[in-house]
Image: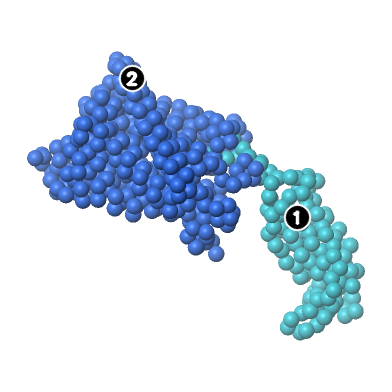
Chain colours: A blue, B cyan
Amino acid sequence: MGGALNSGDTAWLLVCCALVLMMTPALALFYGGMARRKNVLSTLTMSYIFMALAGVQWVLYGYSLAFGADIGGLIGGLNFLGLTGVGALPNPDYGKTIPHGLFAAFQMMFAVITPALITGAFVERVRFKSFLLFSLIWMTIVYDPLAHWVWGKGGWLGALGALDFAGGTVVHIAAGYSALAFALVIGPRKGFGKTPMEPHNIPLTVLGAGLLWVGWFGFNAGSALAANGVAVNALITTNTSAAAAGLVWMVLGWLDGRPSTLGIATGMVVGLAAVTPAAGFVSPMASMVIGAVAAVLSYYAIRFRQNRNLDESMDVWACHGIASTWGMLATGLFATVELNSAGANGLFHGNPAQLGTQFIAVVVTIAFTFGVTYVVAKVLDLSIGLRVTSMEEEVGLDISAHGERAYS
Amino acid sequence: MLKKIEAIIREDKLNDVKEALREIGIVGLNVIEIRGHGRQGGITLVGRSGSYQVDMLTKIQVNIILSEHNLEETIETILNAASTGETGDGVIFVYPVETAIRIRTRERGHEAVMYPGDIDERKGHGKI
């Protein structure tokens, strides 16, 4: 089984594991800065905890459900429980030239950050216990199956020919629409819409956005699973999309008043989320269009969300869900086999059918993640309750849930 | 008779006010960073997408305890130094003070708020 190990590929993927791992603390800072000062530790913890929670779940059974032997295209089998047999030799289905264990570790980092992304929807009011239970259920019945559908050998969306290079569906659309569903169930923060809820430390958010950008090189370029030309192209498209989106967001903010720091940092992250499914399949010029259009879509998606008075607190849906929905569809427009023979041609390269396939993948992902999250959140809300008490919310979750304060 | 001046001023006018007070010989003062609003109401900040109103602004409260005979000159100095003519310049409150006691020397009243080189020494008020 498996081909020969390539030390260059292996070294690169080892580095990528570290880069993608760093994105979770980066996300914690990104969100933490936007929280109010009484909730910053709670917000940080809800991202950080996944390095522990998903770090254990993935090894125990998460990897097996996602990448174990296919069962009907829907879920992986239990043959990799406890990472049994996932070792030093390559698995021909998952990175022909790197140890299978390295592939599992790289994928683990995605399983860590994806549920952390969702937390932006419900910070500052969720009960920690309910949040932990929700997260475990979500990882098990949403993330693991979806990862199998798209990336697992025999998974039905992958078999359909849907292109998702680094997680437009599995990570960003899943997180974005789950965030939207959860926000609808849990309801707004106390005083939302009446008192301004200012970000308490924008420098933290800016630092987080910068570290996310760095980490995203591992996320996207690492998804080539090799140190090759596709990886290099993915790195360039990733950078270009983030750059274009940052500039466009700056201009949009300027037209509405001032080019805010928070806006520019947000635009950069939106560009990164948008190009994620496309990174290894499209040209640098195409990625510039992807980033620029994503900035416009997400910018007005935030406005739409605000006008509906919906407290999806940190705009996970607008920034990740919308941007990556566009990114998936754009992959169906701009993809070309000239850049990646493992991919396919998109509409602009003579294959309109690919756009249809991308559309199906998007619709399925939205329906599945939104639907299941809505039901799980609703059931938890009606049984153990999702929210802290009004008093705990007013005091802030740092003290009421964790018994600490960030700034003494 | 001792008085307390509580001047709520713009954050960025603190240096001008301190400077002007030093020039007329007001030596003892303390400041507090406060948040609130008056006629200005608030300011508009820019968020991720569009702007929003914030109604609690940071202002500086300057506290001065002084003898009544220095009150008007001090108020005039603060008014001149803190004014821009725009809404948000602030407000000055004046209160009567029961007494003041300097901890080190146990001096009371007027003597407790006198300093070397201050407004009273310059005017030859000395110890009244």
The residue shown at (40%, 51%) is A132
Residue A23 seen in this snapshot = no
Indicate which disc residue B9 carries. 1
For the point 71% across and 63% down, the residue is B31
Residue drawn at x 43%, y 45% as measured from the top left: A380
SS at circle 2: helix
On residue A50, the disc is: none
Q: Residue at x 59, y 47 (%)?
A: A190
Who is closer to the viewer here, A384 or A332?
A384
Q: Nearer the viewer, residue A141 or B29?
A: A141
Residue B72 drawn above or below residue A115: below
Q: Chain of mark 2?
A: A
Q: Is residue A363 above or below residue A49?
A: above
Q: Residue furthest left?
A: A1
Q: Position of residue A258 (x, y in %)?
A: 60, 37
Q: Amino acid at mark 2?
A: Gly
Q: Along the line of sight, which residue is nearer the eye, A399 or A277?
A: A399
